[in-house]
């Protein structure tokens, strides 16, 4: 027997909320994965220090460099929740906004090549000279607006 009246409206609202939550969760997972994957890498420490939390930002740092995908911890319900994706390393702001010495004096020591290599130019990381977090957040925001 098909739903009618108030039951039909309630069911339609529930379906819409579930659909929007699923779409929003997919946007978060993809966007946060991109932020982690696009993090400039020298030792990998910055890439491995993204933490996903709900309710309040993480204050953790991972000194062990354990590789993990924090986005798999995305809560099932994200609609109406505050989700934080934080990186507490002291140099993450420099990676995003620049601020490296200009000109570069020595660079970073590459153990494989056994020499110093320059990973920045003009004060910015060569891997993300215009940052990457802000760009990913803008892409996420545009997708959310289109829901």
Image (cartoon, helix red, strand yellow):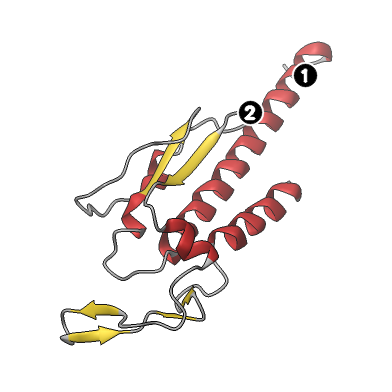
Left or right relative to 37: residue 137: right
Inter-mark Cα distance, 1 to 2 = 24 Å
Q: Return the disc, 1 or 2, that comes first in the chain's sequence.
A: 1
Quadrant in the picture for residue 7: top right
Q: Between 7 and 54, which is closer to the camera in this rendering?
A: 54
Residue 8, labelled with which disc?
A: 1
Q: Secondary structure at mark 2?
A: loop
Query: Which image quarter: residue 19?
Result: top right
Q: Is residue 143 above or below residue 94?
A: above
Q: Residue 15 appears at what percent x and percent y? A: 68, 29
Specify few, some or many for label 2: CA neighbours under 10 Å numbering under 14, 14-19, or 20 or more. Answer: few
Location of mark 2 (residue): 80
Tell us which disc is closer to us: 1 or 2: 2
Which residue is located at x 71 percent, y 55 percent? 142
Mark linked to residue 139? none
Image coordinates for residue 31, horizontal then vertical, percent: 54, 54
In this rendering, is residue 130 above or below 24?
A: below
- Does the rendering let one see residue 75? no
Q: Give above or below for 43 relative to 93.
A: below
Q: Residue at x 63, y 28 (%)?
A: 80
Q: Nearer the viewer, residue 110 or 16?
A: 110
């Amino acid at each position: 027997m098909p739903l009618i009246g108030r039951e039909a409206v309630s069911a339609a609202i529930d379906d819409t909320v579930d659909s929007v939550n699923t779409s929003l969760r997919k946007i978060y997972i993809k966007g946060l994965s991109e932020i982690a994957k696009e993090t400039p890498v020298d030792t990998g420490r910055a890439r491995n220090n993204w933490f996903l939390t709900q309710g309040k930002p993480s204050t953790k740092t991972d000194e062990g460099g354990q590789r993990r995908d924090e986005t798999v911890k995305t809560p099932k319900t994200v609609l109406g929740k505050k989700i934080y994706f934080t990186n507490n390393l002291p140099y993450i702001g420099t990676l995003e906004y620049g601020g490296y010495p200009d000109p570069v004096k020595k660079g970073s020591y590459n153990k494989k090549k056994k020499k110093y290599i320059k990973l920045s130019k003009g004060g910015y990381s060569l891997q993300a000279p215009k940052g990457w977090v802000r760009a990913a957040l803008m892409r996420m925001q545009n997708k959310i607006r289109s829901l």
